[in-house]
Structures are given as structure tokens and as C-alpha cells.
Image (cartoon, helix red, strand yellow):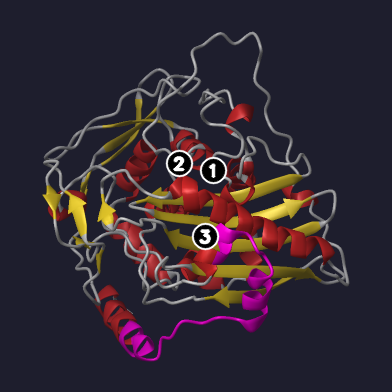
Amino acid sequence: MNYMRYLISAFLLCFFGSLAAQPVTSTFLKELLEKNTNPVFQQVIKDPQNYRLQIIYTQINRDGNNYPSFKNYYFNLDPELYFNPASTVKLPLSLLSLEKLNDMHIKGVNKYTSLQIDSSYDREDAQLTDSSARNNLPSIAQYIRKVFLISDNDAYNRMYQFLGQQRINRELHKKGYPDIRITRMFKGFTSEQNRHTNAIRFIKEDGSLIYRQPPAYNTDSFYFPKEIKIGKGYWDSNDKLVNEPIDFTRVNNVPLRDLQQLLQSALFPTSVPFRQRFRLTSEDYSFLYRFLSQFPSETSYPKYDTAKYYDSYVKFYFRGNNLHLPPNIRVFNKVGWAYGFMTDISYVADFKNKVEFMLSATVYVNSDGILNDNRYDYDSIGYPFMYELGQTIYNYELQRKRVYKPNLSKFQIKYDQRDPADKRPVITDADN
């Protein structure tokens, strides 16, 4: 099937599927959430449409051979209820970047290979060095570290440039995600500028060229099934208040169900259909597991300020008022927050109590209805809600009976430790 025929098939699938789409709520999950009497938590649970709330709780059960099976429970899951995916789009781009490197089959080019990015089109900027890296040079590995450790925006933009807009969307659609739409970088570019991506040079440590990837342009069309406008006003790029909803029609879109499946495909690749798996090596998977779960405090390159980027910084379900997670717990996840939307896609492993589960949720916390004003309800509603949600599910999982306890050794990683003699300055202000 050529790509145009594929797009037509995907369009018809989306069109007829949307006719029957209705929010889905599992009675079991609804009753479980209602048991948490925290006032902020109940405020959100009782008004899911206003908070644009969607939740997927995934139970994982092992058989006698430790093979996992997955059962999803939903709360207000609605593919028609748009949320801005924000930084969660960094998850598929990380997976696609590793996959593309493997597909290139160029000797000396892998995720650790140094690279330099040139400026090839209007408003594009070059990147020749990376002061956060051990060798002071950019690489795909360093970009992936940064997007998972603190959700760095520039690292996402650079992977977008490496992949190209066309490959990003074609590959995700081929993998069975026709509703995903990744149309832009986090740079304030026009639609046309986002179609162009930079030339990239992979180089040896001495600076000599291994391979040059030419600049790219996406000629494919995008399908925008409906108009998406949110809020009652927004501040534009000229700091002027516009008293009408902001238009999200043509921006990035990744349904919550797809995000959950993407993380599941990364952590449990044999549990998803073959076409949804990424072409990764065992070392790629080990690399992903490390940085999906590693804390900024355990990382020397980049060397982040751990007072600002503390261990629970991007672990919403265990953040609360805690800077650290319990020592027996690791969260393998990707979060995103922007425009009042907060999203967390997580796999939680408790090595002491032999507990594991997945939890994916998105919530919109913007009580004044104005976007781009930096006055969102993250602290008063968003973070408290996410923490209560995570603890509700975790506490249930602690007492849930299992026929077979999971062997979680696959996810037990020996993390790095900071060298106390390292006197380099820390990174205190990253764009994320």
C-alpha cells in the first residue's frame, strides 16, 4: 500500500470510528477513585469535562513464566476530548530517533556518535556544541537523556530536526497510530517553517565527517478532523490579550491511549502487536529503561541543580510535597505540562513489595480560562490531584492479590552517582 492510500484508509478509519466514539468509564475505576476523599481530588473527579480529565489504569498480571498480561480500566477516556500533549511528544521522538539510527546502517553512527546541526532554512539555528555533554558535543543519546531527566525542550527540537516531520508522522501512522499528529517544534515557528528541518553532520571526536544528512522538507498533507478551540482568551506573541479561544486545531496531537501504548511498547515490546514495536536493540532498551527512571541527582552529564530539579520533579504521581521517592520505587515515565494541561504516562515498579502497574492521566487546570498568561492552577490543583491519583492506585496495588508475584529484575538498574569532587557549575535554568 502506498502512502497516499494508507492516508485515505486512516482517514476513513478515523471518520467512521469517531461517529461512535463516546467517553468510556469503567465502573471499577470510578468506584475506586470515589474512595479517596481528598477535597481537591474529588473536585476534579466530579467534574471531568471541565477539567478535561482522562485516566487509564493498567493492571499487570504475570503468569508462571513471568510473562505479563495487561488489563486497562478507563475514566472518561474520550478520543474526542482534546488535550495538549506538551512534552509527552518527546517519548515517541526518542523511540523513533533510536529506530532511525538503527535503520541507517552507517558504520560509526549510533546514539553516542557526536553530531553538529547546521542552519538550513529561515529562522533555523545551528548547534555545534553541547556544554552539558562529557565531550562538549551533541549526540542523540544526550538529547534523550535530557528529555527524560527534566523534559528539555531544545533536545526535543533537535530530535525533530534529525527525524524530519515527514518520517515522524509516517512511521507513527504505519505503527498503527493514525490519530497522532506531530506538526511542530517548540520554537514558535510557522507551519511552513516546521516542515523544514536542518542538515546534520555526524562526526568523529577529532571533528572529521562520518556522514552528512541533508536538510529535509515534508511534502505530505495533514488531516485535521475538526476545529479545536479552548479557553475564553489568550495572550499573543505581542503580549496582547485576545478575547477569544486559542486555536489548537493544527498543533501536536497524541491521544492518551496512544501514549500509554507507546510506553508499553518501549517497556514490554512483545506485549504489543508486531507493527507497534520499534526496531531497537537490547542495548537501546537498557538505555531507555535507565533514563526513563533515573533522577537528575544521579546524573553528572548533564549536571543539573538538584535543588531545582529534584528527584520527583517529573514524577507527578509521587511528587506531592516530597523531593524524593521511596527507595524501593522507580517510575519509568514521561510527563508534559503546557497551557494548563498536565499529563503523566507512567510505569511504576515497587521492588520491595513486588508491585507494578501503569497509570496514564491528563488534566486541564486553568480556572480563569486565559491561556499564555502563566497563571495556571498547577500548584493548587494539578500537582495535588496527580499525587492523589498516583497514591490511590498505588495503595490499591499494594493490597491487590496476585497469583504470581512479578520478577522485576529487568527494571532494577544500578544508577550513576555524582562525584563529590566534581566542581563544575550546575545547570539551573533549562528550557522545559
Eye-nearest disc, 2 or 3:
2
Distance between the Cα atoms at labels 1 and 3?
24 Å
**Badge 1 or badge 3: first in the primary sequence:** 3
Above or below, 5 relative to 149: below
Q: Position of residue 219 (x, y in %)?
A: 17, 62
Q: Position of residue 116 (x, y in %)?
A: 32, 30
Stretch of the chain drawn in magenta: 13-42
Report whether residue 347 is seen.
yes
Q: Nearer the viewer, residue 181 or 53?
A: 53
**Badge 2 or badge 1: first in the primary sequence:** 2
What residue is shown with label 2? Answer: 151
Circle 1: is it few (<14), some (14-19), or many (20+) Cα within 10 Å?
many
The structure residue drawn at horizontal position 62% and vertical position 76%, both measured from the top left corner, is 30
The structure residue drawn at horizontal position 83% and vertical position 72%, both measured from the top left corner, is 63
What residue is shown with label 3? Answer: 278
Residue 273 painted magenta: no
In the figure, residue 226 lies in which quadrant? Answer: bottom left
Q: Position of residue 417 (x, y in %)?
A: 68, 24
**Badge 2 or badge 3: first in the primary sequence:** 2
- Give the secondary structure at mark 1: loop
Q: Amino acid at mark 1?
A: Val
In the figure, residue 320 lies in which quadrant? Answer: top right
Circle 3: is it few (<14), some (14-19), or many (20+) Cα within 10 Å?
many
Q: Main secondary structure of the magenta part?
A: helix
Whether residues under marks 2 and 1 lie with C-beta atoms below 8 angstroms apart, the answer is yes
Q: Amino acid at mark 3?
A: Phe
The structure residue drawn at horizontal position 55% and vertical position 25%, both measured from the top left corner, is 307
Whether residues under marks 2 and 3 lie with C-beta atoms below 8 angstroms apart, the answer is no
- Give the secondary structure at mark 3: loop
Q: Residue 314 bears which disc, if any?
A: 1
Circle 2: is it few (<14), some (14-19), or many (20+) Cα within 10 Å?
many
